[in-house]
Image (cartoon, rainbow, N blue to C red):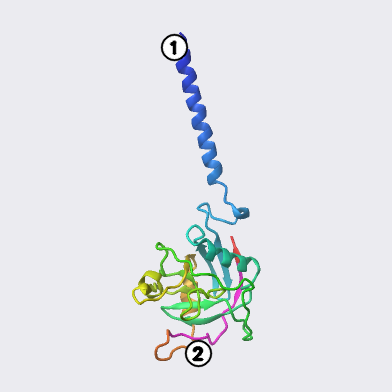
Amino acid sequence: MFKKNKLVFVIVLIVIAMVTIAGVYLTINNTNGDNGNDTPEGNPIAVFDTTKGTMKVELYKDKLPNTVGNFVKLVNDGFYDGMIFHRVKDDFMIQAGRYFPDGSEKQSPYGSIDLETHPDVKHIDGAISMGQKPGDPNSASSEFFICDEAQRSLDDDFLADYGQRGYAAFGKVIEGIDVIRAVASTEHDGSLDYEGGAGGGKPLTDIVINSITIE
């Protein structure tokens, strides 16, 4: 009888332990962090409201915390609200983060950040990445671009073969890729369509970022 009661006691303890562990696990996985603005996986979602439509972009905070942190700060400041996509090119990219419709410019109050890349994050179709000055990989601040189709030539490991650094891709579009297509295919002034240039130009009709919010 003593052995039987001992066995029952041990089984009860095991059950209690399993229930406790399960409760802790569910609590952790249901805690989104960052005031509930993150996905269950821990990555924030940026919602772009533009004059061409709305899109959602997952930001890879888990892989590129410094780059995502800089972008989220700017978003929360309302930095991008009212800006235009000042460079577009079909099958290449759409770029924003510097100019307003009247041509005025705005600089990030936080300055530039060091280049941050991750081997698992590439410039795939819909990838969002930081713009930078030619030849200066640590000059990214507020300008960003979103790829219209994959742009392998912008990846850090690709450009390393040519003795150069790549660009900081830090997320991707998860809803609204049709908006990217619409913006990229907009008629532009061809100001960057010169020999040796990457191509594209300013849209002939302004495409405005009404707002970006962190969901």
**Front residue (pair 112, 178):** 112
Percent across and percent down for residue 198 are 42, 84
Q: Position of residue 138 (x, y in %)?
A: 51, 73
Q: Which residue is mark 2?
A: 189
> Residue placed at 42% from the left, 87% from the top?
197
Residue located beneath label 1 in the image: 3
Q: Is residue 180 left or right of residue 74?
A: left
Q: Measuring from the top left, give residue 180's x and y in whole percent.
A: 48, 73
Q: Quadrant of the N terminus?
A: top left
Query: What's the residue type where badge 1 is placed?
Result: Lys
The residue most toward the left is 161
Q: CA distance from mark 1 to mark 2?
A: 87 Å
Label 1 residue SS: helix
Q: Please, which residue is most extreme toward the front here?
A: 163
Q: Is residue 49 magenta?
A: no
How many C-alpha atoms fall within 10 Å of the one at disc 1: few (<14), some, or many (≥20)? few
Question: What kind of residue is marked 2?
Answer: Asp
- Horizontal and vertical percent position of residue 72: 59, 65
Count the labels in the image.
2
Q: Is residue 97 above or below residue 187?
A: above
Query: For the magenta stretch, what is the residue range?
Result: 199-212
78 or 160, nearer to the observer = 160
